[in-house]
Image (spheres, rainbow, N blue to C red):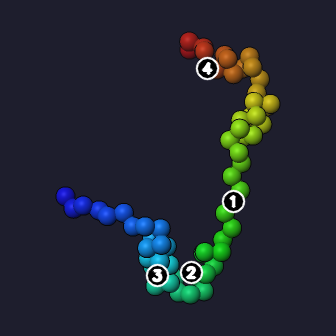
Amino acid sequence: MSEHMVMDEEQLIKKAVQVLMREFGPIEASRFLSIPQPKREDSLKYHQIWQNGLDKETFFNDVFSCD
């Protein structure tokens, strides 16, 4: 089994950009790097929204039923 060395962030970024440039070319690599990241909703806010639409009786029946 070969040992794998973990790269530091600078090496990782440099290598990743090289691969993108080689595989996609400068225009597509630039396009890829500029794709906006989708906003992640805060998990607490997500659960509050989920709980607001939750019917307690249906939820308990689904979770605790012995079907």
Q: Is residue 12 at least partly visible in the picture?
A: yes
**x and y, in percent, of residue 56 in the image:** 75, 20
**x and y, in percent, of residue 57 in the image:** 74, 16
Q: Which mark is residue 59?
A: none
Q: Are marks 2 and 1 in contact (CB under 8 Å)?
A: no
Q: Is residue 64 left or right of residue 38?
A: left
Amino acid carrying mark 1 in the image: Pro
How many numbered discs sit on the rendered protein?
4
The residue identified by callout 2 is: 29
The residue identified by callout 3 is: 18
Residue at 24 percent across and 61 percent down: it is 3
Q: Secondary structure at mark 1?
A: loop
Residue at 69 percent across and 22 percent down: it is 59
The residue identified by callout 4 is: 63
Closer to the camera: disc 3 or disc 4? 3
Amino acid carrying mark 4 in the image: Val
Image position of 33 with respect to 61: above or below: below
The residue identified by callout 1 is: 38
Among numbered discs 1 and 4, the one appearing first in the sequence: 1
Q: Is residue 23 at least partly visible in the picture?
A: no
**x and y, in percent, of residue 63 in the image:** 61, 20
Residue at 69 percent across and 52 percent down: it is 40
Q: Secondary structure at mark 3?
A: helix
Closer to the camera: disc 1 or disc 4? 1
Q: Is residue 63 left or right of residue 6?
A: right
Among numbered discs 3 and 4, the one appearing first in the sequence: 3
